[in-house]
Amino acid sequence: MTPDEFRALGYKIIDWIAEYRETVEPRRVMSHETPGAVRAKLPASPPVDPEPFERILADLESIVLPGITHWSHPSFFAYFPSNTSLSAVLGDLLASGLGVQCMSWQTSPAGTELEEAMMDWLRQMLGLPDAFRGAIQDTSSNATFVAMLCARERASGDARLGGGLQSIEAPLTVYTSDQAHSSVEKAVLLAGIGQEQFRSIETDGRYAMRVDALRARLEEDVRAGKKPCAIVATVGTTATTASDPLRPIAELAREYGAWLHVDAAMAGIAMIAPECREHWAGIDEVDSIAVDPHKWLGTGMHLSAYYVRDASYLTRVMSTQPHYLRTAADDKVTNFRDWGISLGRRFRALKLWCLLREQGTSGLVARIRRDLANAKWLEAEVRKTEGWEVVAPVPFQTVCVRHVPRHLGGMRDEDALNAHNLAWADRINDGGKAYLTSTVVAGRRIVRVSVGAEATELSHVKKLWELMQETAGS
């Protein structure tokens, strides 16, 4: 493809994206393709001869789009917001166009230094202390894994340099709440700590980790000859967006010498609004934090911000220095290849730079406050409507609800109530006008309404509420 051909096609693709965003609202939110349907439309073998790009665009419309669930749809209320603002789309395009490799400072100085600056801008926006330094990871799952590796090495006295975990006498233990994301347990397993040493701590009526239960388990393990390695607290759990009490947990982490990591993947973004920071009081006392700008902020995947209090410990665990990567600048610069698992690194800071400059902190804070207000509106409507329950606090943008019709509510038949709430949520999703997700918390089926798609206004939340009442009541 020549630059002239690229220029002409590029204009078409930008127009296509703009038109898609303008026309996404009338589309069905959730894809209704059956398993294997998209694959069946694709040739079994790669093309031998070149094809015109116009044919690729035509197949994008006929093959790919029917299999897309529209996360940019204003009636997308499932999972979590995963916004890609158009300024971030352009930043992604620029990064692809430049095609640089950001594994070290020398491979692209601007890649490293822009990332340093963007992580510091975001740190200031989140209200984090000056001591924290950040690097871009692909997801919070990967950031949690990096945190577990650092915790493992600190607790084991850098066992990786000798016989590994097999050489240490006291088994390492890791603690998190029973509402934590599944990636925490996965990270513990991948770090070689083992399922038997993973502790799931009970939560209270607000679904936050019980500090008394954590202390009791720590004391029990120490008496049994085990060594506390890490505690993972959550700000904004997956099911209900509950927040664990960081300050008392940090006190226990210090007392028992455990690494304290905070998973604030989605809800951490709310902290750009200063009034939300009460939810992570004590964040200044933790060892590491993961926040995902690719969710509620709008950078698009993959851009997770991982902050550490002591970057030297992180680089000591992650760094490798083969001769072919060494440069004369290494002792003066940051090499982000030593801040995570991957050696190869895309120029992801560019899309964060474009987003922050095009939106400004004022624009981004205004959008977060809009979503918080819309969630509060829905919470108030549900609470005052007979037959409906809000089943968890609403600290951020997710409202957890349950419909309890009179004929089931009197009997409190939990199995029937669970089936009923799953059924009406499924009917909404099958209808295509909105998309919700459900989960089970404390044995009860609940429906999560996650407000936060960039295009979602109060009018869309009101339409959803009408649809929920109509569907659940039918």
Image (cartoon, rainbow, N blue to C red):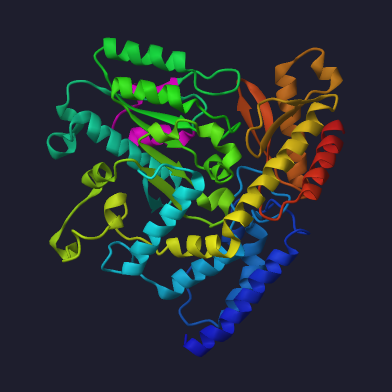
Give the magenta-colored segment's residue range. 181-200
- Taking depth in this image into account, of 426 and 132 the one nearest to the observer is 132
Going by the image, does 26 lie left or right of 50?
right
Q: Residue at x 64, y 58 (%)?
A: 67
**Magenta stretch: helix, strand or loop mostly:** helix
- Vertical position of residue 119 compared to residue 154: above or below: below
Q: Quadrant of residue 466?
A: top right
Going by the image, does 96 lie left or right of 73?
left
Q: Quadrant of residue 426?
A: top right
Q: Is 156 a magenta residue?
A: no
Residue 420 x %, y %:
76, 28
Q: Residue at x 66, y 22 (%)?
A: 444
From where the camera sits, is residue 124 visible? yes
From where the camera sits, is residue 41 visible? no
Residue 268 x %, y %:
52, 41
Across the whole image, how many numbered discs are drawn on residues?
A: 0
Q: Residue at x 73, y 50 (%)?
A: 75
Q: Is 199 a magenta residue?
A: yes
Going by the image, does 434 lie left or right of 339?
right
Residue 454 x %, y %:
66, 54
Q: Residue at x 38, y 33 (%)?
A: 286
- Vertical position of residue 380 compared to residue 443: above or below: below
